[in-house]
Image (cartoon, rainbow, N blue to C red):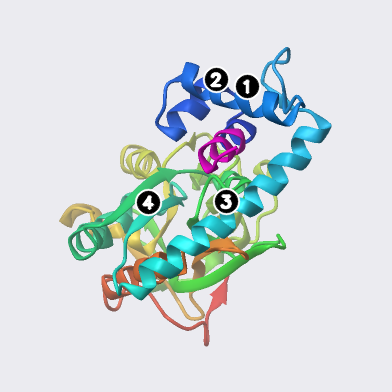
Amino acid sequence: MNIQQLEYIVALASHRHFGKAADACHVTQPTLSMMIQRLEEELEVKIFDRSRQPVITTQVGQELIDQARQVLHEVELLREIASATKGKISGELRLAIIPTLSPYLLPLFLPAFVKKYPEVKLKITERTTAQIIDLLRSGALDAGILVTPLPNSGIRETPLFYEPFVVYSAKDYGKEYLLPEDIDPSQLLLLEEGHCLRSQILNICALRSKSNLHVEYEAGSLETLKQLADVNNGITILPELATLYLSKEQLKKVKRFAEPVPLREVSLVAHRHLVKQSLVNALIETVLAHLPKGRVRFEGVGVDVV
């Protein structure tokens, strides 16, 4: 039995597919399958039921995998301690970001992080909030950046900043700052179901469901929403960072809310037993250092978090 074999069974339990698990471990599928089979032969138990698709763990297999995760956690802790004594930041950090943040936040801090920490391998993926939570619990992720608070125990939240919302519309409202009731629900464009931003916008406008809206369009991305608003004279609500990359003509369509400004809390989340704390601290420091001044807030005094 070796550490590599433990990594393989944990990967297969997480992905439930030999090919995906092999890719995650950077080995060939036959190698992963053979090493797992050898471990099963050594322990004289079946860890996985290969007759099922997707692959599932046996009862004893699940107990072994739970224990393997604890062992790997302790191994990672040893590496973290050793790295800290050398005074350097290195290793691999697996990070996921929700789609309504990643295209706007990543360009702000990623180049600086890569330059400052050349010995860190940063693996980034876009995932929904629910997917990030599941991946953190399974050990397939080290950290995530998403909107909080979360109703889930066992996930540690570190607030980074508070991001205001703005209205994006060509309509002339006749005043500088808008109230939620100024928005016409019949013209409001939303993200499709499954995006947490959708429910936040519904909360801003005090709307409960799609049936209240008479919505003709539901988009999968904020970029699509902006385009739909441009061509149909519609209205949508955007997070502040999404306005950083607008053209001069598009910026004329941005209207701001009156105080208290609705905003969302953006946090870095991790499992409560996170080991790679030095890597996460380096990431947090870099993100905060490269946020645009005056475009986000760092305390929730006098504002409404939605």
Mark 4: amino acid? Ser
Is the Cβ of the residue at disc 2 closer than 8 Å to that at disc 1? yes
Residue most toward the right? 59
Residue at left offset 79%, top offset 28%:
58
Q: Nearer the viewer, mark 3 or mark 4?
A: 3
Q: Could you tell me how far apart the alpha carbons at marks 3 and 4 are, in whole angstroms? A: 29 Å
Mark 2: amino acid? Met
Q: Nearer the viewer, mark 3 or mark 1?
A: 1
Mark 1: amino acid? Gln
Residue at left offset 64%, top offset 33%:
13
Q: x%, y% of residue 86?
A: 31, 72
Q: Earlier in the sequence, mark 3 or mark 1?
A: 1
Q: Is residue 199 magenta?
A: no
Q: Is residue 9 magenta?
A: yes
Q: x%, y% of residue 115?
A: 17, 61
- Name the residue nearer the viewer: 241 or 277: 277
Q: Nearer the viewer, mark 2 or mark 4?
A: 2
